[in-house]
Image (cartoon, grey):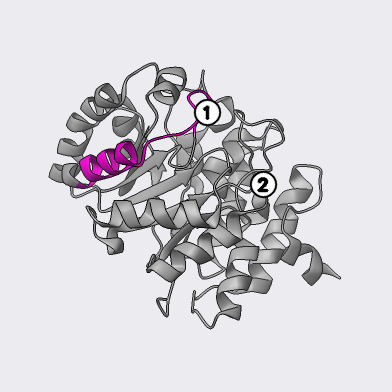
Amino acid sequence: MNGHVRIVEVGPRDGLQNEKTLVATADKVELIDRLSATGLQSIEATSFVSPKWVPQLADAAEVFAGITRKPGVHYPVLVPNEKGYERAREVGVEEIAVFTAASEAFNQKNINASIDESLARFAPVMARAKADGVRVRGYVSTVLGCPYQGEVPLADVVRVARELHAMGCYEISLGDTIGIGTPGKARAMLKAVAADVPMAALAVHFHDTYGQALSNILACLEEGVAVVDSAVSGVGGCPYAKGASGNVASEDVVYMLHGLGIATGIDLDRLADTGRWMASLLGRETGSKVGKALAV
């Protein structure tokens, strides 16, 4: 395993976009600023998708303009198309993320496009990002299963990841969107993708629907992955899986990594405190077991 793992904190975007409780702009800004003070190097700040589809993130421009960007910390934002890219650039965004799925059925339901059509939409965004010196991260969802088609062939996961990398994404995040993966399947999926895309360009993103996220992460760490997506307090949830408990909690991932002797550069106590603070905004207890334990 690698001696250092980078956590990509996705709570402010992937987490909050699935929360029913609307969070005030000022609170989103404070959340990101609190996260910036924990030692995190990558914090996904928001999403420049249509406010009609994601009302929670309708204030993307205001949030990004309001945060205090700490030197050395990256603040990627999600963009679905050129219009989203333009809105992001207007407020000084320097890193973006694009997203598609390995499942044809999921893409059709989620963005009303085939996999190939979604990749084609990224082409002009990628071209503009390259010209502007903007880094691009790629997301591939449903890598271990789809709520509509069930099993997703590994060949499809590999193809999509390979295409995104070839288009210019510096990193590809492989997401178990509905949280049904198990360690053996997670390991096999990662090895298959790593045969075509360098391991150094891969990240893993697990939801914890069946309580398998930490086990899946460990299996992937053992294969050499060194980037893990997670959300403070386990915020979020998957609208496509009944009972889905959301993203794996950043606090729990960091606790496990530190226990393995793997450095993260993150202050766990401060991160857990931020998780409890955010949970209180949402009117509930933190979704992190470590966060609850450290509060005692």
Residue 41: tell me if it is visible: no
156 left or right of 146? left
**Image location of residue 67, percent across then percent down:** 50, 51
246 left or right of 106? right
Of the 4 image quadrants, the one containing the N terminus is: bottom left
Magenta part, dominant SS? helix
**Image location of residue 118, percent across then percent down:** 29, 26
What is the three-letter code of the residue carrying label 1? Ala
Q: Which residues are magenta?
A: 146-165
Give the numbered dot on residue 282.
Answer: none
Distance, label 1 to label 2, CA atoms, is 31 Å
**Residue at image x 65%, y 64%?**
252
For disc 1, the marked residue is 58
> In the picture, residue 19 is in which quadrant?
top right
In this view of the protein, which residue sits in the foreground, 116 or 235? Answer: 116
In this view of the protein, which residue sits in the foreground, 208 or 180? Answer: 180
Examine the structure image and report whether residue 157 is included in the region drawn in magenta: yes
Examine the structure image and report whether residue 154 is included in the region drawn in magenta: yes
Query: Dot 1 lies on which element?
Result: loop
For disc 2, the marked residue is 210
**Image location of residue 111, percent across then percent down:** 41, 21
